[in-house]
Amino acid sequence: MAQPLPGAGRDERSATVADLLPGLPDEPGVYKFYDAHGTLLYVGKATSLRNRVRSYFQKTEALDPKKRQMVSEIADIQYLLAQTPAQSLVWEADLVRSERPRYNVKLRDDKHYPYIRINVQDPWPKTTVARRMERDGSRYFGPFTDSTSVRHTLDTVNRLFPHILCTRVITGQDPRACLYYHIKRCPAPCIGAIDNGDYRGIIDQMVSFLDGKSSQVVEDMRLAMEGAAEDLQFERAADLRDRIRAAEKVVGQQQIIYTSTADEDAIGLYTEGPFSCVQVFLIREGRLVGREHFVLEGQGEETQQEVLSSFLTQFYSQATEIPREILLPVAIDDADTVAAWLTQRRGEQLSDHAQTGAEAAGFEGTAGASPDPMTSWTNGMDRGNPKRGRPARKVTLLTPRQGERRKLIELASQNAREVLGKLQVQWLADLERTTGAVVELGELLDLPQLPHRIECYDISHVQGTHQVASMVVFENGQPKRSAYRKFKIKHEEGNNDFLSMQEVIGRRFKRALTGQLRDRGEEGTWEESSQQDRGPWSEMPDLVIIDGGKGQLNAALEILDAMEITELPVVGLAKENEEIYSRERATGRAAQNPVLLPRTSQALYLVQRIRDEAHRFAITFHRSVRAKSSIRSSLDDVQGIGPKRKRELLRRFGSVKGIKAASLEELAAVPGMTIPQARRLHTSL
């Protein structure tokens, strides 16, 4: 468990914060502030926990209003000792990203940003989009701000570097190639049109291009073209010529920033109200190869230095490449600690890249295990040595005052201002539109109050098998994904949507009525909640939408009536004509005449969006359940194949069918597999 201060348990409220402060150690680490309800308020790092935490309670009048409010709410303090200040910096960034404390500056909408993943450790690498980095030997590039940026980049590399885009298992003996070969997006190793060495040469060029070494890639392709022409391989030479032209066009679009070949990130910052926007210019070999913007929220009176420091740790803890120089608009207070951590991170990345190259070349070796900040937190006194990569050239944080670098930072800051302005206009328009839709929906359905919280339910199955249901929640017209819930249908009556809907509605509202509420435990499991009003099911909706017509609505109303919930607005949405059936006050059943919302109304758009989201969530869960069932039927009976090996096998071959088609050698090459296990699996399938 995390290390509490003496007398600082959440169940011992008699101790005041002043009583807790003397127990703080004079060592580096991470601290957490909780309020009286156990809600996490703030996560911070410190070179000296004693001095840093005490500073919040000394001369509180000097604190900004937000910090004063936070201090007034602190009822509990916990800490975790770190071996170095750099280690505490990493833990702070991971905890802010995962737990999103109320008073921390954090990336807005910090779901996992997308990356481009190239599984270079596989015999025939290909590109995919990933939402998180794993230490699996693959090369990752990113993070990107959104999926549009990823798709644009992938489209570019697909045109320049033809490679496998389908899910075939490569044997070299397929009778025919897929469409990608005929449109020159794949060299068709499936039919043996290219050997593994030449294919890996293409992948190496792709990796170098994504690393920003575009000039070297173009030069390599030019030499290869000349060599092919000398060997009278005119078709290959023509293909390389076309790829060179496309690459030169891309390189020509990259703005030249310096006459030197500098590799650096230039960071601009603009703050307005509670939001800040950071613009990152990615400069490689003196060229601007990319730009990404990120919005941070939660700051009150924080200075630019504090916002930048928070951004640097959150961004570069996820970044796939750290340059030798990072240009900042202002100097940060903990620059030495951040620079030391970045240098260590850069060294780890270089080690990973070297390890990946060795594995791709056929050398054995396993990358070191990634330190888990959450595991480190729960083991409060674990002070093992942090992972060290090979020595790297020092990362330097620069704050130029004049010259072309200063102009570059000012340009990045100006871009950040423009981006934040556009986003604020968009947020305002979205807010007005969704607020108007909520008001309009309440009026058209004659609801007793505005439907601030709307719940929608949908059933999904295939001919009565693997039945599941979804519950999605929208608050003020926006999805609240943390409140989404999934249900596995328990009845055994087969294809009976009415009974399934009754079961789901009954289970959901029974918990709200009887106090059978549960709360998330530390390991992500559900435990009995000590406070009924804190359970995830306790908040009653203002409107319930049933995905279905009168039949499904009547089924839901029947179970609600049995539970004496008669005043809750419930409607059914029929798919065919978007007809909305509501409860008839006289009979308590679905009204005979549906409500037809105007086709151009924002209320109809909101209802459709909620219904589609419930359908998507249910379908996704159903596919997951069905896939697990399918995998279990064929893999779980094989001795020695556990969940981890199953994941690795499916990641490598894509499906059970792909596993069946793999050779004994290919199965044995999967991480965690041995020759005897591969032989046993091969025989069983």
Image (cartoon, grey):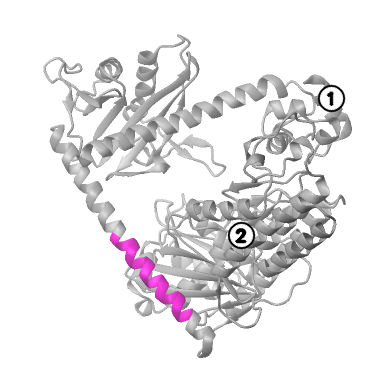
Give the extent of the magenta segment: 409-425
Label 2 vs 1, first from the N-terminus? 2
Task: Indicate whether 497 appears above or below 308.
Answer: above
- Looking at the picture, how far across and down is residue 496, in whole percent? 40, 12
Say which mark, if any, is on residue 680.
Answer: 1
62 vs 350, nearest the viewer: 350
Provide the residue designation for mark 2.
246
At x 21% / y 43%, what residue is drawn? 437
Vertical arrangement, residue 678 with respect to residue 158, above or below:
above
Q: Secondary structure under badge 1? A: helix
Q: Is residue 367 at all visible to an observer of this figure? A: no
Labels 2 and 1 touching (C-beta < 8 A): no
Q: Is residue 301 magenta?
A: no
In the displayed structure image, the side of residue 170 where residue 81 appears, left or right? left
Identify residue type, mark 2: Ala
Distance from disc 2 to disc 1, alpha carbons, whole Å, reads 48 Å
Report if residue 357 is visible in the image: yes
For image coordinates 50% across by 68% down, the residue present is 311
Residue 95 x/y as whole percent: 54, 57
Number of disc labels: 2
Q: Amino acid at mark 1?
A: Arg
Q: Which mark is residue 491?
A: none
Q: Secondary structure at mark 2?
A: helix
Badge 1: residue crowd in 10 Å (few <14, some 14–19, many ≥20)? some
Which is the main secondary structure of the residues drawn in magenta? helix
Residue lying at the far left of the rendered structure: 586
Rendering coords of residue 645 (x, y %): 74, 35
Question: Residue 203: x and y, percent?
Answer: 73, 53
In reply to whether residue 419 is colored magenta, the answer given is: yes
440 in relation to 3, above or below: above
